Amino acid sequence: MPNAGPTSRKATLTEDCMASRRKVPQPPVTTTPRTPIAPAPWPEHTLAPVPGLLAINPGGDDAYALVSETAAPEQGPYRLRRTDLVDHSVRNGPFFSEASLAFLVGDLWVFGAFDASSGQPSARAEACEVDPGTLSVIRTLDLPPARPADGIMALAAGPAGSIWIGYSQTLLRVDAATGTVLDEITVPSGLVVTDAAVDPAGQFLYVSYAHNVGSPSVGAEEGAVVYEYDATSGQLLASTMTGPVTDSVAGASLVAVPGGVWASFRTGMAGLTVLLRQGNLAPIGGGTGDAPIGSVFHWMMGASVVYGDGALFLAQEGGLVACIDPRTGQVRGSETLPNTPEQDDAISVITVDGSARLVYGGDQDGVITVTPPASCWS
C-alpha cells in the first residue's frame, strides 16, 4: 500500500481534480478480499500433575485419582489421592482393590470387579461411597456377585439422590444416603452390562449391553445393544437390536443428554460416536461408517465424550476436540490441540464447568482445562 503521509494524499487530490476537469469517467473502485483470519486455538492450560486421574470436582478445585503402588505391572491395591488444583497440595486416603472412580450425588464412589493382586476379573463386585473432603469411607455396599465375571462395572446418578449400578447380569438402583436397594432390573439372558447413563432430568436410564460369548463364570463381550428404561421404576421403554451400535466390537460407552443418548464404540481399530433418539433409540446424528476416519465422529483407537451446560464435547486420541449440539449432532466448532513430537497427544475430557465456561480433562501432564469459544455454548 502507498505511504499514507501528506505526499500521497496530495497526489491523490491532484489526480482527482485533473480528471474532473477532463470529464473523464472514473473507473469503478475494486477491492481485494482479505484472507479470512483463522480462529484462535482453544486455550489449553495445565493445572496440576495428577497420575491416575479419574475424577474432578471443579466446584472444590480438587482432582481425584487411584494410584497403583506398583509400576511394572501396574496393579492394585490403589491409593486414593486428592490433589488441590490451586496449591497442588496432595492428601492421601485409604487403599482400595477397585480401580474405578466417579463423582456422583455429591460424593466419591470407588468401584470395580477386579482382583487387586492379579488384575483379573473377579466375581466380587464392590462399590464404596467416600467423603470427598476427608477421604474416609462412608459405606461399602453389599452387592450380589458378578456372574459371569468380566471386570466391567458402571455407575450413574439416578433420580432423588439415588445411583444406578450395573455389572454383569446385575442392574440395581440404590439410595445413596442409606445404601438401600430401591429397584432392580432383570438383565436379558445372554447379555452383560457394559455401561449406564441417566439423562440430566433424571427421567431415563440408558444401558448398553454386550453379548456374553464366554462361559457362565468368566465373561467375554461381543457386539452391543442399547436399552432405555424409566429411571425411577425401571420399566423398559425401548431397545435397539439393529443400527450402527450393533457393529461394536464389545459394548458401548454412553452419555445421556436431553432428548437421547450418545453412544461411543469400537468397530475395530476405529470407532464411532452416534446419537440415539429418546423414545425409540433411532440413530439421528453423529457418525457413520462412510465418514472419513479422523472426522469428528469417526475416530481411531479411542474417544471420550462429556456433556454439560447445553454442550457436548468429544476428544479424540489424536488431539482433536469438538463441541457439538447435544440434541442434533451439529458440530459447533473443533480444534486440534497443539503438541510436540515428545508429547502424547491423547487427551480425555472428564467434566464441564458451565459457569466458568471450561472443559476439564486429562493428558500425560495431568489435569488440563480447555477454553472453548463462545459459539460452543447454547
Image (cartoon, grey):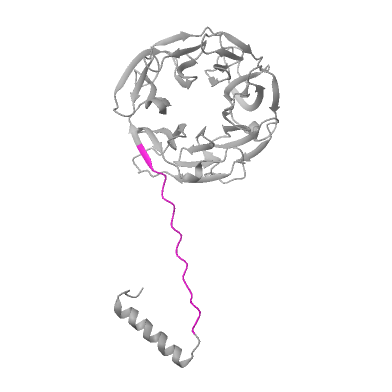
Compared with 192, 36 (above or below) is: below
Residue 90 placement (x, y as % from top left): 30, 22
Let me know if residue 36 is in the magenta part: yes
In the figure, is residue 203 to the left or right of 142?
Answer: right
Q: Is residue 234 left or right of residue 146?
A: right
Question: In front here: 106 or 298?
Answer: 106
- Say which residue appears at 50% left-offset and 87% top-offset: 25
Name the residue rendered at 32%, 74% in the picture.
Answer: 4
In the image, is residue 260 above or below residue 79? below
- Magenta-colored segment: predominant secondary structure: loop
How many numbered marks does the figure carry? 0
Q: Nearer the viewer, residue 231 or 262?
A: 231
Q: Which residues are magenta?
A: 26-45
Name the spot of residue 345 as percent of width and height, x first: 40, 39
Q: Position of residue 231 (x, y in %)?
A: 63, 20
Is 308 a magenta residue? no
On screen, residue 94 above or below 104:
above
Q: Position of residue 342 (x, y in %)?
A: 33, 40
- In the image, farthest residue toward the bottom: 22
Q: Nearer the viewer, residue 200 or 192?
A: 200
Q: Residue at x 54, y 21 (%)?
A: 157
